[in-house]
Amino acid sequence: MSEHPNAAMYRDVMEKFNAGDTNAMVDSLADDVVWWQIGSAEPLMGKAALMESMAGLGEMPITVDLTDVVANDDMVVGLVTATVGSGPEAFSYRTAEVAWLKDGKVAERRAYSDDTEAINNFFNQFS
């Protein structure tokens, strides 16, 4: 049984992201994407707002290790372990990334974590 094309697209984007091609992730998003951060009460509205929110991380490396991907014509669910930074300062966490697609782009994304408080504490130091 072959993988759904949206699952293959998600895997491809994550592989490119891990290889340093952040444009692949940006290109996979609709300009008006609704991006829910882990634990946030309000989403980031639009690709520009998302990119601005990530600016505080600077050149800190982020990698994702995919555990599994499930997809259909309308959505993708990726189970990932994300790692921010490297060496002893690295921070890793697990998420379920849920993305709703429209016209081949991510229109809305929500992420659910194994430790929302730890994730928010870590990322709050960069905002």
Image: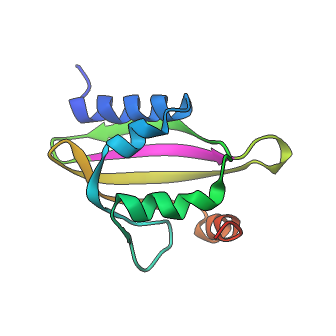
From the viewer's perspective, is 33 left or right of 82?
left
Image quarter for residue 126? bottom right
From the viewer's perspective, is 24 left or right of 39?
left
Can residue 63 be seen here?
Answer: yes
Instruction: Give the residues in magenta.
Output: 76-84
Q: How many marks?
A: 0
Say which quadrant the C terminus sits in. Answer: bottom right
Say which quadrant the N terminus sits in. Answer: top left
Image quarter for residue 32? bottom left
Q: Position of residue 3 (x, y in %)?
A: 26, 25
Q: Position of residue 21 (x, y in %)?
A: 49, 33
Can residue 114 be seen here?
Answer: no
Q: Residue at x 58, y 58 (%)?
A: 55
Question: 11 or 20, which is in the foreground?
Answer: 20
Q: Position of residue 26 (x, y in %)?
A: 39, 45
Q: Residue at x 35, y 54 (%)?
A: 98
Specify the principal SS of the magenta part: strand
Q: Residue at x 36, y 58 (%)?
A: 47
Q: Residue at x 47, y 29 (%)?
A: 15
From the viewer's perspective, is 11 left or right of 81?
left
On whether residue 79 falls in the magenta region, the answer is yes
